[in-house]
Image: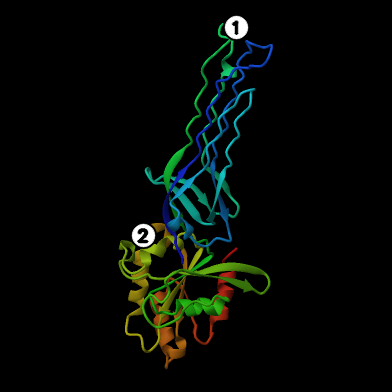
Amino acid sequence: MFVDYAEIKIKAGHGGAGSVHFHREKYVPKGGPDGGDGGKGGDVIFQSDHNLKSLMDFNYQKEYLAGDGMPGGGRDCYGKAAIDLHVKVPVGTIVKNKETGETIIDFNADNMVHVMAKGGLGGKGNARFASSTNQTPFYAQKGLPGQEMEIILELKLIADVGIIGLPNVGKSSLISQMTHCKPKIANYPFTTLVPNLGVVKYKNEKEFIIADMPGLIEDAHHGHGLGIQFLRHIERTTILVHVLDISDFYNRDVLDDFQVINNELELYNPDIKKKEQIVVFNKIDAVADRKKITQLKKKFKKYQVLALSAATGEGVAELIDRLASKVT
């Protein structure tokens, strides 16, 4: 199951208490203080891992608690520090403070490490407080509490190319043609319930990641359809491929479709609208008169337009060539 949002609580460990203890043994009736310090509490440490693709685990476990440090002992024995708690998250995860909404860190690369909550220091034992004026201190420090907070995890997939468009225009078929990805394909709304990721290998020269963004319809930014769940993933893409259905069986105006999606992108985040877009006329295998393609291109003079068929593969190689020249 693909999950790209979670709210959890993290809590670092408390420091162990310092010890109040005095040296006692035969022939040493008045030994000095020898209470040891407490151990440090465990940190909560997050690390990004490219092998993870979802925040699903955080739906089942809502609290992440590191261990407490051990108390100090006599004979200047220090308490054992607690083991740090390591938590792995997918690359592309953004961590926010739930209370303030402030972004703490963006894990936008593999193997990034961040101490999310620091464990408390251990308290000092009474041996630390001996002085010329107080040779028998009967007190020690308590350990300090560890940091704790509630955080929000948001996963934004990292892809070079994002495929966008209304449902059933052929986005999943296109990514299937371009990569070895095998998404679920059928002719009904919201066949694709999760973003599909694939890798395009171009002439043994370069690779780039492409993602099919599902569920975009009018008012997606308000939560209609599935769009609000996946609009965030488009923010990380470098270039957008906007797929339109121009088949003879399609009864909508493709320019209206194009504007509907772009309006949703702008309402969600105006910066997305600034991304370069390649317009793809799909399903040309279902166009009886190819003059229709030329006529439709006149409506998209400001954009690069490619006509292809994701079903037969016609024109797909040209699209891959165009994308390969634009991604680094």
Toward the viewer: 320 or 215? 215
Callout 1, which amino acid?
Ser
Which circle marks residue 132 in the picture?
Answer: 1
Above/below status of 45 relative to 25? below
Callout 2 crowding tier (Cα within 10 Å): few <14, some 14–19, many ≥20: some
Q: Residue furthest top?
A: 133
Disc 2, SS: helix
Residue 54 lies left or right of residue 25; in this view the side is left
- Residue 154 image point, x, y percent: 44, 55
Q: Are marks 1 and 2 in contact (CB under 8 Å)?
A: no
State left or right for residue 265 relative to residue 176.
left
What residue occupies the far bottom of the structure in this picture?
Answer: 288
Q: Which mark is residue 268?
A: 2
The amino acid type, in three-letter code, at marker 2 is: Tyr
146 vs 263, nearest the viewer? 146
Rendering coords of residue 87 (x, y %): 54, 50
Q: Nearer the viewer, mark 1 or mark 2?
A: 1
Residue 311 x, y percent position in the rendering: 49, 85
Residue at image coords 58%, 59%: 50
